[in-house]
Amino acid sequence: MSEHVFTVDRPILAIDIGAGTQDILVYAPGRPIENSEKLIMPSQTQVIARQVEQVTKVGRPLHLAGRLMGGGASSEAVERHLAAGMRVSAHPDAAGTIHNRPERVAALGIEIREDPPNGAGIVELADIDLDRVGRALAQFGVSLPDTLAVAVQDHGFRPGSGNNEVRFEYLQSLVDAGGLLSRMVFRQPPAGMTRMEAIAQAYPGVYLMDTGAAAVLGVRGDPIARDMIDAGGAVVVNVGNMHTFAALVKGDRLYGLFEHHSHGMTAELLDRLVSRLRRGSLDPESFRSSFDGHGAAYSPDYHRDGPFDRVIITGPNRNIARPLGWYEAAPFGDMMLTGSFGLIDGVRRFDALANTTR
């Protein structure tokens, strides 16, 4: 199989951050990508949830330090701490993890303050803990590469708009202006993408992608999947722990997509959504109201380059789709690293595009 599309000229630390796991790949040029160091570890929101639970267990006030990160398990643990009748405070930067609007955070009973109260248990919020990753790898004589690439699922924030509205506008932007896969990689986060902004502030020069877009690139590490995409086009479906992302892809272009919550997802529902995505009948407004989805988006010319009659499935909950008989991609033999492989290819694509536009 041709692997040149995943070849980059320098080492890269790729971290694909999901709701359940953070999937870590250390890429080094000049060796088979299958021999890369790999870690599938609990995501930071899971790690922080456990740290919050320990503070709750000992009955101390809780102070959230650090910066904005993804919520989910960590936010739920904070809510349980409050429900137990214990105090919570948060640094202004960390408070955005609970809600983007400070007044909503305060309404929950969380005090926003710079310094922790006396006696508080302090939990540091961040989507990435490179110190911990570095220490783990150092035990095996592996150094952290200088180049960092990260994928997150970012709802974003814009005053006066709901999170799902901002998220949908971002998804639409992925298919606008030609839908080139190379334009789904960023050094400067798109406007309003607060998780990406927090990571970029902590790690200047980082390469950033959305988790769904990273999965779309990553499946190309499977030769059968790549042939499907490059020939007649395919629907790539990533069934994650919290969200299901599906995209119409042909060659190096994205023609349409939808994003839905994974909870409550069934084979029947997924089959119906994918069929409607192919037909172009997922109206964005009705998709959100009728299917509880984040959004659906199409390129104006998607009908011309279809029919996208093959379906490629990936993600930790891909077993949901198994009864449908769709092709299960295993890029470089490792499905769980799909997004991380996509990040490596994303760096290559970003650099190539930057070189052609200089």
Image (tube, rainbow, N blue to C red):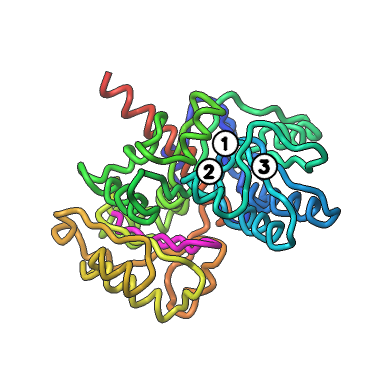
Q: Earlier in the sequence, mark 2 or mark 3?
A: 3
What residue appears at the point 34 percent right and 50 percent down from the top-left corner?
166
Residue 63, position as x, y percentages in the image: 71, 42
C-alpha span from label 2 to label 3: 11 Å
- Amino acid type of the residue tagged 2 in the rendering: Gly
Q: Is residue 333 visible?
A: no
Q: Which residue is mark 3?
A: 64
Q: Which residue is mark 2?
A: 96
Highlighted magenta segment, given as a residue range: 237-249
Task: Depth check: give the residue in front, 248 or 251.
Answer: 248
C-alpha span from label 1 to label 2: 7 Å
In the image, is residue 263 above or below residue 106?
A: below
Residue 284 in which image quadrant: bottom left
- 254 with respect to 293 (left or right): left
Residue 246 is a magenta residue: yes
User: Quick one: SS at disc 3?
Assistant: strand
C-alpha span from label 3 to label 1: 9 Å
User: Quick one: SS at disc 2?
Assistant: loop
- Amino acid type of the residue tagged 3 in the rendering: Leu
Q: Are marks 2 and 3 in contact (CB under 8 Å)?
A: no
- Amino acid type of the residue tagged 1 in the rendering: Pro
- 187 with respect to 297 (left or right): right
Q: Earlier in the sequence, mark 3 or mark 1?
A: 3
Q: Which residue is mark 1?
A: 92
Residue 269 in which image quadrant: bottom left
Q: Is residue 242 visible?
A: yes
